[in-house]
Image: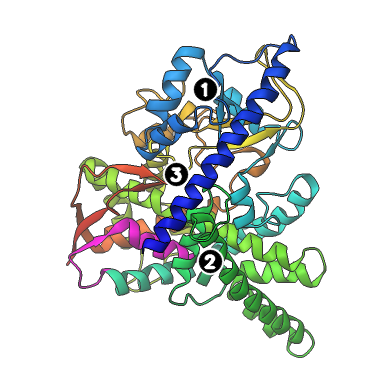
Amino acid sequence: MACASTINLVSWVFSFFVAAAMVCIIFFLTRKKSCSKNKKELPPGEMGIPWIGETIQFFKAQRKNRLFEDFFQPRITKHGKIFKTSLFGSSTVVMNGAEANRFVLSNEFKLVISSWPSSSVQLMGKDCIMQKQGEQHRCLRGLISTTLSHSAGMEALVPKICNSVQLHLDRYWRGQDRLHLYRLTKILTFTIVFECLLGIKVEAGMLERFERVLEGVFAPAISFPGSRFSRAKKARMGIQKMLVKVVREKRMEMEGGQDSDHHDHHHHHHQEGMLLSQLVAGMICGDITEEEVIDNVVLLVFAAHDTTSFAIAMTFKLLAQYPNSHSLLLQEHAEIMREKKSGEVLRMEDIKKMKYTWQVARESMRLFPPIFGSFRKAVADIEYDGFTIPKGWKVLWTAYGTHYNEEYFKDPLSFNPSRFEEHIPPYAFLPFGGGPRVCAGYQLAKLNILVFVHFVVTRYDWSLLCPDESITMDPLPFPSQGMPIKISPKL
């Protein structure tokens, strides 16, 4: 034990000196520059202390899941919708509002490019679509979205997702009277990505490995032994090994089966692990590389895993707090059940009837966005709203900037699913982002949420064990206690 803490202390002291040295260097560099200040006007705002900027205030607010209240709101009030700050060592302009969102998101590849911290890039992999620009991004994304948003592909996924959800409930819910909803839905979303999309059986320890990678994604990219980042890198190597094996087996199976019983084989693939088959097929034609296949599988798991389970958890939290909504939602599902013969599976047309359920889920994501926004980097000087954002600066758009704004949502802090019956202005509701990088897994997330809600509310009565449970963030939001609930099977 002592040894580990000494290493930690040494590494802490070391990183402190590195940081101090950098502060000095940057301080001198910036002092020289400010004399030759150009006449273009930067947005108002404070840059905080050298190098660190306002990162500490940002992290503090994030930990308490009060980014909007403690970080964005006070600065919007003081400086307006567009303000400058410095976060994670980069000069950053934060832009709020539907117009600003539209501007940032629709100018992807032209004025801005997606920009992630170096630790994220190293762990997700430099070959995933999060990192690709322009033409390369389009080609890869096209491959992925034919599976993830194509109606025939989705239609085929419905029974598989239903099956996964039912197996999950049998295994983790049956016979229990209390459980941790958030914790369990993480296992479920993980299983759905692997078994339904990739056709890979989930083995013991796989989920923990991915979680370890996730822990390092926003940690400083410092590789001394025992750091969050190096633990994450080690886990990433393990995942890499496992996936390389799976991808190569799949490739041999697909290449081998091409001559003999071509038709049969093709049909079988269509059923099992559609996305993986699509990607490996792209690899066989030489359109994409093995690294691209693997990095995108890792990204997919990462993107689906915490976000979907958080959206599900918040949906249940709000249903518990608003019994009227709960009973409206129950009626919708009872109606669907009435139309079905006993034991008959759900189909896409049943999912389409879950209109109110989807309003509840969207209202939950409006109030509790699974991702607060994302960073872009200016690839040219950008003129916007009378201000200049210099080339090389980061640009941050946020979901809070519109989700919590009177202008777009009347009485924004109240829970009101029926507001989604009316027209929502474009770029105001952004739990899935927008523009060319809009979430590729949007349809999958929707199916996952709706199917899960359906089976739970038709089979169980449930209530929150910690109604006042706080939401923390590290780096993504989660219920601090794992969302314990009490359940009893419906008769």
- The spot of residue 487 in percent (x, y) is 19, 61
Is 344 on the left or on the right of 235, as rendered? left
Would residue 33 be visible to someone looking at this image?
Answer: yes
Q: Is residue 235 above or below residue 19?
A: below
Q: Which residue is mark 2?
A: 235
Question: Which disc, if any, is residue 208?
Answer: none
The kind of secondary structure element at disc 2 is helix
Q: Residue at x 57, y 51 (%)?
A: 222
| Marks 1/2: CA–CA distance | 35 Å
Q: Are marks 3 and 1 in contact (CB under 8 Å)?
A: no
Q: Residue at x 55, y 57 (%)?
A: 224
| Marks 3/1: CA–CA distance | 28 Å
Is 178 part of what is drawn in magenta?
yes
State the quadrant of the C terminus: bottom left
Q: Does label 1 or label 2 sit earlier along the sequence? A: 1
Q: Quadrant of residue 62?
A: top left
Would residue 336 be visible to someone looking at this image?
Answer: no
Is 329 on the left or on the right of 35, as rendered? left
